[in-house]
Image (cartoon, grey):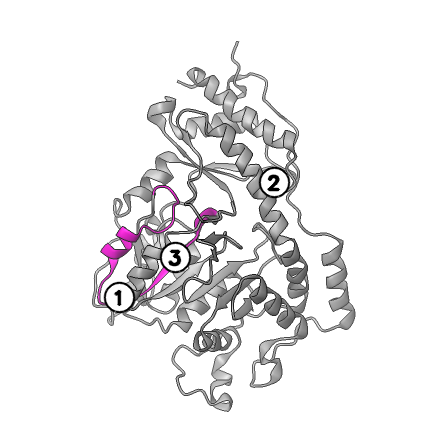
């Protein structure tokens, strides 16, 4: 008789895991206070004290700056908007190149394209999945103006080496910290190591405001340019007396007072939510690390990984079946969660290498790599980032079975699911 559920056996668990919901009475009361005031947004796209938003937005930004050891915290309506604002603030323009990760959410690489610049994809480190310093160095040309680092899955990238490269070549460093709030690199919070950090408050992040984001910087000039880009900067430069108006044409990237009210309360919960993730992963690491052919996350000494997901490396040659087969067998043993009934909490790989997307394969933009100002050549062919391709197509497993709200028994069931598949892998051959 088969033991694995995928072959007709009894699954380890059929009961859905708990929903991930960090919203409570505190957020409800805060939003109702804003609603009762009738002041749902107080931004003005003109040079006025309300250019910087209403009292709740400004309080949220002040709280965020304090929590993240940053001089400035600037709220926006999404991490994507934050990326666009950061690239614009650094003065990136048509003909420039920005080094980006090939293994992250699409917006990280798209941000340079918005300003007519060219994303150049660097490979990632095999262990922490952040940008490889060696690959960054090999990508630099006279047109390179910035490095956009992603602290992917909550694990800090190798920032000492990356900052050294940036200093050597006089490059801006932008940190995409969407998945890494309060992660630290050698005891310094990510988002404060480079020139600008960007954080996400999308609904499936560590904390959220539904949609939203925050930029951090210690540079006054960059902060001013981010403010301009966030809020119709073309209306502000003349009355404020700003002389350098390059890239100061603004968007509407503003956060509402209601979102900020939720953010203030969510921020208070963030440290404990992260500690719960770490506790769950420590237990998972201890047990899953005993399975031959599975490598648990590698965290460099002195760093703090905050685990947006637990990312595992899987070695087919040791286990004896390919990764996708193993993951499909696990999915049959363990269900998803409430509110995610039709979406598994585990996946084979993460996102397809970005340079293989149609946008890059077809060079489908009006400027950027098609711009007459661009004097370089850029390669988006299969094979340019071998580590990314190996991880995505063969090795990487990512899962969310470490989210806050998981009980000890919930975590034990996840471990049992992995062990059951590993112990009965002969059924899959």
Q: Residue furthest top?
A: 1
**Magenta-highlighted residues:** 126-153
From the viewer's perspective, is 18 left or right of 130?
A: right
Q: Which mark is residue 395?
A: none
Compute the Cα span from label 1 to label 3. Answer: 16 Å
Q: Which of the pair 179/47 is nearer the observer?
A: 179
Compute the Cα span from label 1 to label 2. Answer: 45 Å
Residue at 64% across / 61% down in the picture?
263
Q: Are marks 1 and 2 in contact (CB under 8 Å)?
A: no
Q: Residues within 10 Å of mark 3 (few under 14, many from 20)?
A: many
| Residue beneath disc 2 | 340
Secondary structure beneath disc 2?
loop
Look at the image and tell me whether residue 175 can be seen: yes
| Residue beneath disc 1 | 169
Look at the image and tell me whether residue 98 can be seen: no
Compute the Cα span from label 3 to label 2. Answer: 30 Å
Q: Which mark is residue 149?
A: 3
The answer to whether residue 309 is magenta is no
Residue at 53% across / 36% down in the picture?
282
Q: Is residue 140 above or below residue 289?
A: below
User: Where does residue 162 sit, x and y in percent of width and height?
Assistant: 33, 57
Q: Residues within 10 Å of mark 2 (few under 14, many from 20)?
A: some
Q: Are marks 1 and 3 in contact (CB under 8 Å)?
A: no
Q: Earlier in the sequence, mark 1 or mark 2?
A: 1
User: Where does residue 70 sit, x and y in percent of width and height?
Assistant: 51, 67
The answer to whether residue 129 is magenta is yes
Residue at 45% across / 25% down in the picture?
291
Secondary structure beneath disc 1?
helix
Q: Earlier in the sequence, mark 3 or mark 2?
A: 3
């Amino acid at each position: 008789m088969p033991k694995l559920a995928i072959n007709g056996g009894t699954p380890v668990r059929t009961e859905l895991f708990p929903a991930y919901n960090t919203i409570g009475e505190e957020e409800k009361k805060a939003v109702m206070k804003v609603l009762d005031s009738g002041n749902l947004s107080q931004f003005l796209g003109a040079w006025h004290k309300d250019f910087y938003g209403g009292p709740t937005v400004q309080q949220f930004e002040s709280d965020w700056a304090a929590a993240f050891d940053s001089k400035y915290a600037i709220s926006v309506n999404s991490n994507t908007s934050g990326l666009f604002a950061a690239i614009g603030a650094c003065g990136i323009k048509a003909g420039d190149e920005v080094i980006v990760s090939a293994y992250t959410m699409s917006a990280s690489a798209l941000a340079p394209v918005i300003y007519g610049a060219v994303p150049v994809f660097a490979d990632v480190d095999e262990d922490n999945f952040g940008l490889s310093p060696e690959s960054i160095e090999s990508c630099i040309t006279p047109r390179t103006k910035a490095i956009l680092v992603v602290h992917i899955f909550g694990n800090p990238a190798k920032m000492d080496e990356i900052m050294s490269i940036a200093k050597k070549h006089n490059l801006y460093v932008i940190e995409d910290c969407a998945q890494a709030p309060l992660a630290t690199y050698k005891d310094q919070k990510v988002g404060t190591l480079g020139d600008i950090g960007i954080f996400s408050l999308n609904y499936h992040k560590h904390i959220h405001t539904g949609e939203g984001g925050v930029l951090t910087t210690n540079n006054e000039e960059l902060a001013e340019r981010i403010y301009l880009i966030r809020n119709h900067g073309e209306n502000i430069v003349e009355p404020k007396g700003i002389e350098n108006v390059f890239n100061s044409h603004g968007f509407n990237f503003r956060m509402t007072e209601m979102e900020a009210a939720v953010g203030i309360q969510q921020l208070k919960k963030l440290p404990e939510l992260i500690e719960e993730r770490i506790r769950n992963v420590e237990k998972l690491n201890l047990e899953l690390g005993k399975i031959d052919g599975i490598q648990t996350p590698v965290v460099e000494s002195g760093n703090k990984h905050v685990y947006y997901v637990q990312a595992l490396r899987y070695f087919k040659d040791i286990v004896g079946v390919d990764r996708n087969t193993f993951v499909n067998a696990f999915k049959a043993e363990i269900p998803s969660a409430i509110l995610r009934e039709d979406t598994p909490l585990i996946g084979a790989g993460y996102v397809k290498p970005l340079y293989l997307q149609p946008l890059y394969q077809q060079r489908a933009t009006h400027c950027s790599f098609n711009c007459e100002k661009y004097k370089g050549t850029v390669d988006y062919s299969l094979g340019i980032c071998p580590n990314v391709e190996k991880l995505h197509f063969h090795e990487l497993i990512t899962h969310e079975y470490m989210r806050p709200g998981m009980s000890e028994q919930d975590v034990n069931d996840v471990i049992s699911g992995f062990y059951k598949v590993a112990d009965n892998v002969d059924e899959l051959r």
